[in-house]
Image (cartoon, rainbow, N blue to C red):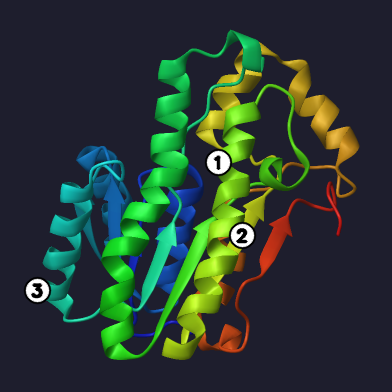
Amino acid sequence: MRVKDKVAIVTGGGRGIGEAICKKLAKEGAKTVVTDISLETAQETVDKITSEGGEAIAVQMDVTKMSDVNSVVEQVKDQYGKIDVLVNNAGWDKIEPFLQNTEETWDKVIGINLRGVLNTCKAVLPEMIEQGSGKVVNIGSDAGRVGSTGEAVYSATKGGVIAFSKTIAREMARHKINVNVVCPGPANTPLFQDVAKQNPKISEALEKAIPFRRLAEPEDIANAVCYFSSDEASFVTGQTLSVSGGLTMA
């Protein structure tokens, strides 16, 4: 097992990519803390994990609230005594042209996608420094690398996550803490399915554009996260890995 007995906190673990990440880490031996703004969906993920013999707990957490984040970190420390892995997966988007965005949309996208990552890293990194090890895996997006029409602010936040991660990777290396980014391409998630209902042709167009001729499955992303979370990636830090079926390269 690649992360046996590691304690992993995953944000946005209630569905989609987050759910797949939690299930993968648990399957590989991690004690997985499934956090989500919805305790109900977090518990659903936990139930799936435990039904297959894995270990996991569900915790409600709003990543935009530092008080929530600090409370969860204390709870995990009390229960497990350590935090080995932090996966920042929680995210939100609203697809529309930038000039149609409201400031409320900006605030929500920035709050969850960027401020949320700052909050969790601020709370968890001191614990990792104290124990002299840790893995942080931030979920970016190829939208943050190459841009994406209708996702201007989302792209900005994901570009910010990439830049932030590189800087933190430099600062944390002396403490033997690895920080890396996984950038999904278009993925078959509940969020994407909602978008596809409004624009049925989008799936077909993307499948034609992707060299592998399919969307990513959440498990494809989870596999990359598991690698960065494991000791196999002990000498890898500050890197950005696109999991896009070749849609973006370089």
N-terminal-most mark, 1 or 2:
1
Residue 6 in percent (x, y) is at 34, 81
Label 1 neighbour load within 10 Å: few <14, some 14-19, many 20+: many
The secondary element bearing badge 1 is classed as: helix
Q: Is residue 163 left or right of 14 when viewed as pictured?
A: right
In the image, is residue 228 above or below residue 39?
A: below
The secondary element bearing badge 3 is classed as: helix
Q: Which residue in the structure is indicated by mark 2?
A: 182
Q: Quick one: which residue is furthest to the top in this view? A: 100
Q: Which residue in the structure is indicated by mark 1?
A: 157
Name which residue lies at 64% across and 48% down. 217
Disc 1 to disc 3, C-alpha distance: 32 Å
Q: Is residue 118 visible?
A: yes
Q: Is residue 48 left or right of 200 when viewed as pictured?
A: left
Residue 219's quadrant in the figure?
bottom right
Asked whether the beta carbons under mark 1 and mark 3 sit within 8 Å of each other, the answer is no
Disc 1 to disc 2, C-alpha distance: 14 Å
User: In front: mark 1 or mark 2?
Assistant: 1
Disc 2 to disc 3, C-alpha distance: 29 Å
Name which residue lies at 84% across and 26% down. 205
Badge number at residue 78: 3
Badge number at residue 208: none
- Please state which amino acid type lies under the numbered disc 2: Val
User: In front: mark 1 or mark 3?
Assistant: 1
The secondary element bearing badge 2 is classed as: strand
Front one among 250 and 98: 98
